[in-house]
Every structure is written in C-alpha cells, then in structure tokens.
C-alpha cells in the first residue's frame, strides 16, 4: 500500500487573493483525492451524486482544456493525435 504524503491542510484559505485561492484549491483537491478518504466517501454517495459530480468535473475539464491537453494531462495519453 502506497504511503500518502501529508498535505498541509492548515495552509488552505480562500477569499484573500487569487494566488492563495489557487494554492488552496490545489491543496484541497489533493486532500480530497486521498485514497483513504475516497474509499470511505464513494460507497456513501448516491447514484445521482456520483453522476452529478462526474458531470461537473468533466464539464470543467472540457471548458478549460483543449482536446490535446485533456488527453495528455487528464488521460495521460501523450500519443493522442487528433
């Protein structure tokens, strides 16, 4: 089992300035994506919650990333040539 790196949650603070918001969001998402948390949370989500979350995240990716970036950065498909 992979040991997860400790994330400094005490550094998360929103609303002061854009740079801090961006740094805080990155930390928040890293905390959210920890295996232990996901293993506990996902089985408790309803079908609608799962569908809504996936839809919202997918819409954000497609809104802010070009197709090439989506394939390279999200899917890890560096050979995507469309």
Image (tube, rainbow, N blue to C red):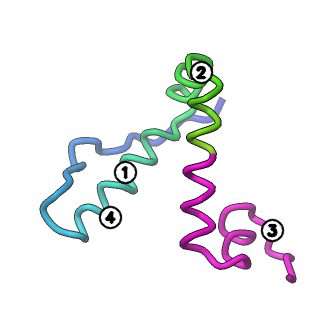
Q: Which residue is mark 1?
A: 27
Q: Residue at x 56, y 41 (%)?
A: 53
Q: Look at the picture and state if 39 lies above or below 12.
A: above
What percent of the width, then of the height, locates residue 50? 62, 32
Determine the secondary structure under disc 2. loop
Q: Is residue 34 above or below residue 43?
A: below
Name the secondary structure under disc 4: helix
| CB under 8 Å between discs 3 and 2 | no
Mark 3 and mark 4 in contact? Answer it, CB < 8 Å. no
Q: Which mark is residue 46?
A: 2
Of mark 4 and mark 1, the one earlier in the sequence is: 4
1 and 3 marks in contact (CB < 8 Å): no
Query: Is 36 covered by the magenta stretch?
Result: no
Q: Quick one: label 4, few (<14), some, or many (20+) residues within 10 Å?
A: some
Instruction: Find residue 57 and report its horizontal and vertical position in percent.
Output: 57, 52
**What's the CA distance linking mark 1 and mark 3?**
25 Å
- Does residue 60 belong to the magenta stretch? yes
Q: How many numbered discs?
A: 4
Image quarter in which the N terminus is found: top right
Magenta residues (range): 55-82
Marker disc for residue 59? none
Q: Tell me the distance, in whole angstroms, between the alpha carbons under discs 1 and 2.
A: 26 Å
Residues at marks 3 and 2, CA–CA distance in whole angstroms: 30 Å
The picture quadrant where one finds residue 59 is bottom right
């Amino acid at each position: 089992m992979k040991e997860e790196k400790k994330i400094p949650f005490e550094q998360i603070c929103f609303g002061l300035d854009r740079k801090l918001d961006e740094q805080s969001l990155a930390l928040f998402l890293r905390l959210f994506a920890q295996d232990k948390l996901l293993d506990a949370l996902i089985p408790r989500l309803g079908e609608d919650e799962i569908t809504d979350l996936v839809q919202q995240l997918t819409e954000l990716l497609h809104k802010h990333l070009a197709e090439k970036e989506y394939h390279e950065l999200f899917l890890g498909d560096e050979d995507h040539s469309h």
